[in-house]
Image (tube, rainbow, N blue to C red):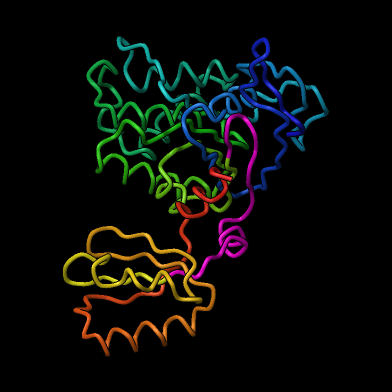
Amino acid sequence: MNQLTKSYGKEHAVRDVSFALENGRCTALLGPNGAGKTTILKMLSGLLKPTDGTIHFTKTKARKDNRKYIGFLPQHPVFYDWMTGREFLMYAGRLSHLSFNEAKFRADELLTRVGIEEAGNQRIGKYSGGMKQRLGIAQAMIHRPALLMLDEPVSALDPIGRREILQMMKDLKKETTLLFSTHILNDAEEVSDDVLILRKGLKVAEGNIHDLRTEQQKAKIHVQVKGMAADWLQEWRAWAQVEDIEFEDDLAKIRVNDLEQAKKLMLKKIVQQEIPLISFEVARTTLEDLFMEVVNQ
């Protein structure tokens, strides 16, 4: 994808976004609402025509129809409620130019794969939200796509359904390239290998999660005490080793510029002043830390 742009008049939903997807990896599109995640997925799937820029699949020549290589689950999938799950998958398979026998075989295979084989002959109108989400993933996979794209795949699910879909996504990336959008950072951190972070239609960061964390690494120490942390640790703000302290009730999140020296001084003060310590932890940079850092730049 090279310099993808989508404009509506003078407004840019996406502007000059370029990135590449590696085979067999899972990439998360991250960003707040309105960042351009869904617009990018719709352009890649052929549902929206880019105002500018190019999309290229390694298997095809430039500007050729790539849809046969793509499986797509929109954020709000729509089904024919009068169909059974099996009928719908066979219908999707036939639309994808599978033979009748192949569509039937794939429908049965995928109903089992996504865990709703017992509901295969049940009308979709009686499916729960989680079952419909599973059925949507199955239809996106019916033609064995090289790229599977999921738009906010767990946003409307309860905790159990969310956990099941995330596990399914971990399994799916073993057999296809996976691209999904989300604003739930924990989900991205759990499932994805790479991330692309968007803000107001612009790409602000991309790459391997581990590498990005290393680049943005900030030394942090979390100190939890009995009572209000600010009452005990406010004076630490003045230390040369401390860049900033964020107080949250009994917890202090302390960003430091010299981790070893800061640890020694803090532990010394805790003992000398008999501060009622509950926990003392050197914290790693999380995806949320990285996200907030680059989005607020």
Looking at the picture, does residue 263 appear above or below residue 8?
Answer: below
Residue lying at 20% horizontally and 64% vertically, measured from the top left: 228
Q: How many marks?
A: 0
Residue lying at 49% horizontally and 19% vertically, measured from the top left: 92
The answer to which quarter of the image holds residue 277 is bottom left
Tell me, yes or no, whether the highlighted magenta stretch contains residue 200.
Answer: yes
- Left or right, 7 with respect to 280, comes to right
The answer to which of 214 and 221 lies nearer the viewer is: 221
The answer to which of 273 and 218 lies nearer the viewer is: 273
Residue 168, horizontal then vertical, whole percent: 40, 45
Q: Residue furthest right?
A: 61
- Left or right, 263 with respect to 290, comes to left
- Left or right, 28 with respect to 272, comes to right
Looking at the picture, does residue 270 appear above or below residue 226?
Answer: below
Q: Which residues are magenta?
A: 198-220
Instruction: Quarter of the image for the N terminus: give it.
Output: top right
Residue 242, horizontal then vertical, whole percent: 47, 72
Tell me, yes or no, whether the highlighted magenta stretch contains residue 93.
Answer: no
Residue 121, horizontal then vertical, whole percent: 28, 22
Residue 17, horizontal then vertical, whole percent: 70, 34
The answer to which quarter of the image holds residue 252 is bottom left
Instruction: Quarter of the image for the C terminus: give it.
Output: top right
Looking at the picture, does residue 169 appear above or below residue 8?
Answer: below
Residue lying at 64% horizontally and 23% vertically, measured from the top left: 43
Q: Residue furthest left?
A: 227
Residue lying at 31% horizontally and 77% vertically, measured from the top left: 280
